[in-house]
Amino acid sequence: MEFIKNILSICLLFWACFVNGQSITVNSTNYKQTIDMIGGDMERSSKAIQNAQNKEEIIQWGFGDIDFNVCRVQYDKNQELVEGTKNWAFYEKQVATMKAIKAINPDIKFFGTMRSDYDGFGDDNNMPDWIHTYNTKATDVVKYGKFLADYCVYMSEKGVPISMLSTAKEWMWHVRASEVDDIIYTLNNELDKRGVAKPIIIDQGFWSISAGLTYLKDVAAIGTKNLYQGFCSHNYANEDPEKWVEIIEKSVALEKPMYDDETSTGSGSPTYGEERAMFKQIDEYIKKAERYAAGLSGEIYFEIWSRGIDKETRSIYYPASGKGKRLRGYYMMKQFSNNILNHTYLTSSTQATSKVYTITFRKNDKVVLWVINGGSSEYSLPISMDNSSITGLVNAHYWTNNTPIEGAETIYTASGNTFIPKVEAESMNCYIFNVTEETVDVCGLPKTILYEAECYDDMSGIQTQAGNEGTDVVSYIENNDWIKFEAINFNNGPNKFTARFASNNSGGRIEMRLGSAKGTLIGTLAVASTGSWEKWSTAISEIGRVNGIHDLYLVFTGGEGSLFNLNWFKLESVPPSIALNVTPGNERVSLNWSLNQIEIGTQKIYRNTSPDIGSRTLIAENISESSYIDNTVTNGTTYWYWIEVTDIYSVVTNSEAIEVTPTYVNLALNGIASQSTTDYGGLPERAIDGNTDGNFNNNSVSHTAGIDDDRWWQVDLLEDKKIVDIAIYNRIGKTSYSERLNNFTVSVIDGEGNIAFSQFFEDYPNPSMTINTGVGGVVGRVVKISKSSDQAITLAEVEVYGVDLDILNLSESNLNQVRVFPNPVADVLTISYVNANKLSNEINVALHDIKGRKLTEFNSFIENEIILNLEDFSSGIYLLMISDKTNSVTTKIVKL
């Protein structure tokens, strides 16, 4: 009965999906712009790359494993701050990285752009003061043209010539369209005299699209479009997608392509190696969908790697200790970039889907389709080509919150011009397949797991007609009609039957029988009404185990008249699998799992401190539930877990090894912050708001007054805790801001006012530091940061890592006299006394929750053991306190 309910639920789900017309249509021959630029940026990161432990591997990841054709590099005012005094040493690390990139990608083109100076005030120009006066916005165009020529000549002499150049970046008023003519004339004249190839000009990397529109308007007015090969812009003003449409239309009117020279991978921000939430990547690719739909001709990923050691987390991140690593944004960038260059954008459309976006490219017969689902709904979406047939399997690469950071892969089988993938909530999906505009004999194609219904070997009662999904369909199906497929190989163990149908009647059933229309029944699929003979739905049924080669009969049963139309069916072998999830906690790990295609015999749980399955240890067996709490772990130690299931046929299946590290919690988040004084609105609680952003303008930095004789900031944890680590995140911005936090003392004070820990630090955190209070930690209630030197105390965040003290009194001498088993416990718990004379006559046994709240208690007299029935208590962690008049012992209990 439960199986039937599940099948009906699946049918209703698909019925709802298709009655609402949810689908995607790709206009497979509607060609738009061709993508001729895809690149990565190393504008500010060359020094960090050269300092990374595995720099060769990092460069291979960036420009060897990804098919970039452009690398953006910087020219910088430090080249010649004082007129006539060259500082070519400034570019040494950049040149070294450029040479390494060119060695693994000889065809790479270097795109030189100005490094913007974001201080941007007074003498902090993007260009040297002898070229540009910031206050008046006056530029000596001849000197600037020679400055750019010097840069191009130097890079050419170093063997890494600049192929593309922007005359400025972001701040268009530094170099206006009316000035570019003279700059480029001087640049080209100088390069001709020195025998160096001239770069093409792609201007200007505007900060906002609106600024770019102004620039393009000026170019059109003064008639200088022939100076440029193309234009480029950012969208850091977060303007609406319509602005991209507007600027690309103006660029096309000038007969030039438009590029985005600073796009994101969805990684980023100063999170110091932490993976960003999946929705960050989804948001970025939704923006890509909007830009390419507007007509964008290519892009450059901004800072594909961190610009410094332990700095912003980009798609490739390098820590202060250990090797650089790739994050999820890297693998998405790789999949996208390796399937876009020299491809042509196709239009596509979605129907009746919420927050679903598409990006489609085509090169010859190859189609690359991205489906980005930014919503919370899961879809089974028919995807169709409007003028083409799909000629082979559809390869899918996808990401969800639950896939590995590399993504996951699967294959779909198409029918004619349509395939139906599962598009999970909050997911990124890339489908790659081949198409043709020629007529395809679907019945002559090699047999896979999908069988076209009209390609039967024999039939009774049915007819065929043209369908609206690219192939013929079996129609006019009535009760007891059937179709036969000869010599189906069942030796690969198919266990799932899927059918595609449409019905404007009450539907019916499909019986799967072997040998004849009245042969062995191996499965039945319920077919629901879809509301129309051309509204298609898909339903799934399990089938029994079969071996050998058999003729398969699909027998149709139901009421009066035509029951339904049938497009195709699939016979799939879904291997047994275990989906394991683990959640770290304080000194515990919670496990839960689900089984697919497994009939449980026995279940076991294994653990190891490495991913080596050969040396793992059994920690629990004969588990009847699908969840477990392991409270025998140590904080800070990394563990790997496996679930092993033996089914009723003695087939053993293991889950993937899942890695987890139990950890201390940040106690400061629940504390109360205070400080000696408050200035500039920098409230003390900003330093315990969970936000490590060190930019004071973003309202996440505390600030005392600078004139106090005794400056301090502290967090009160409200009661004594065991404190292990204290992390301090400093204010960032100008170097002088960070340097203010110097000659400071970090103290831990317990509830009695005693100093449990104190350490002095002369230098400032840059940008953060972690202080360990010693082996086992210290007991304290208040964490205080104080200083008597000049300048205020400004803190971005203070994190205090540790654990609550045992809520009830512990007596270690008595603890080893009490034995509690089994632990974890299902229903019945036994308490035994190894040395009963250590306890007085009257015993109290109390059960508390993890926060110390008493749930129940039992009074007993001395016996060898006490039996407690915990059947009515929910699963979780409890504290069991056993006490007499003078002693008490406490231990953790895990209730399954």
Image: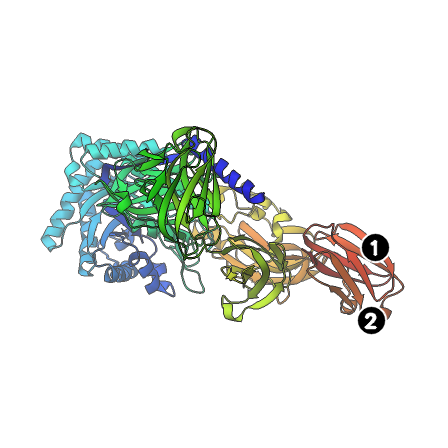
Secondary element at image label 1:
strand
| Residue 631 spot, x, y in % from top left | 64, 60
| Residue 878 spot, x, y in % from top left | 71, 55
Residue closer to the observer: 564 or 292 = 564
Q: Which residue is mark 1?
A: 858
Are discs 1 and 2 less than 8 Å apart at CB? no
Quadrant the C terminus occupies: bottom right
Residue closer to the observer: 780 or 473 = 473
Residue closer to the observer: 357 or 77 = 357
Q: Given the image, on which type of amino acid does mark 2 rest?
A: Asn
Task: Identify the residue at horizontal 66%, vertical 62% (top origin).
Answer: 778
Spatial separation of the CA atoms under disc 1 and disc 2: 20 Å
Q: Which residue is mark 2?
A: 835
Quadrant the N terminus occupies: top right
Residue 99 in sight in this render: yes
Task: Identify the residue at horizontal 37%, vertical 44% (top origin).
Answer: 484
Q: How many marks?
A: 2
